[in-house]
Image (tube, grey):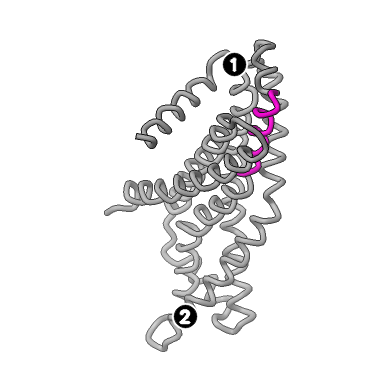
Amino acid sequence: MKFFEFIGQYVLFLRGLFSRPEKFRVFKKQLLLEMENIGLGSFGIVSLISTFTGAVSTIQIGYQLVSGLVPEYLIGRIVRDSNILEFSPTVTCLVLAGKVGSSIASEIGTMKVTEQVDALEIMGVNSANYLVLPKIFAGLFTIPLLVIYAMFLSLLGGALSGSLSGIINLDFFVKGLRADFIPFSVTFSMIKAFTFAFIITSVSSFHGYKTEGGALEVGQSSTKAVVYSCMGIIFFDYIISELFLKR
């Protein structure tokens, strides 16, 4: 029953975002601030994670496929597909769920327990629309861009790792990247990125907005935001893969 109660409250929360919208000038200002916080603030950790994800995947795949019977360029092809289809969108968004999600939940939760949200409501401001909607739109814009950036760095890290470790020649790796490339793989990854971006920002905002109590409850809301966001990412990762990749 608690699950259905959570879903109902979440849907009502999303509906309330679009009632009494604020002026576009105010929304635009908040949107730019949130894009800076979510996008630029996550640039460093995404760079580190994606580069080493590509490097490690090349080493592990090369270790398993070292055989005279398997063409060497297949390492590059497998690294390409695994990173574009799964590692770049899913791992990146799981990391962002921890960084961005906890930040959003703690920020809104702190405003809620210190009665700043109540002050906005008293002034006639739709607090959910003012605080949450810019975060959702900023996430929908910046997180897919971070995923594209993660794709590039993961392949670059894989190429450098394979070349420096002697697992695969750079020319063969590039040949594998080009071999039988399916453009829909990038489209599929973007579908996942937009879905995960919405889950991270909306679920984290919901838990922050429902915070009641004090500092302890803010920490609990932040933890719930990360846990529920990660669960949502994993669940919809399976659903999207089942819908779009099933033959």
Amino acid under label 2? Glu
235 relative to 35 in the view: left or right = left
Q: Which residues are magenta?
A: 102-115
Outermost residue toward the left in this view: 247
Q: Residue at x 42, y 87 (%)?
A: 67
Report which residue position mark 1 lands on: 21
Q: Secondary structure at mark 2?
A: loop
Where on the picture, by quarter, is residue 30?
A: top right
Task: Please tell me how crowded label 2 is: few (under 14), some (14-19), or many (20+) other residues with Cα within 10 Å.
Answer: many
Task: Please tell me how crowded label 1 is: few (under 14), some (14-19), or many (20+) other residues with Cα within 10 Å.
Answer: some
Say the numbered circle drawn on residue 72.
Answer: 2
Task: Reply above or below: 168 against 133.
Answer: below
Front-lying residue, 71 or 122: 122
Contact check, label 2 and label 1, Cβ < 8 Å: no
Q: Secondary structure at mark 1?
A: loop
11 relative to 213 in the view: left or right = left
Q: Residue at x 63, y 29 (%)?
A: 134
Q: Where residue 20 appears, x then y in whole percent?
A: 57, 13
- Point out the frontmost of discs 2 and 1: 1
235 relative to 204 in the view: left or right = left
Amino acid under label 1? Pro
109 relative to 6 in the view: left or right = right
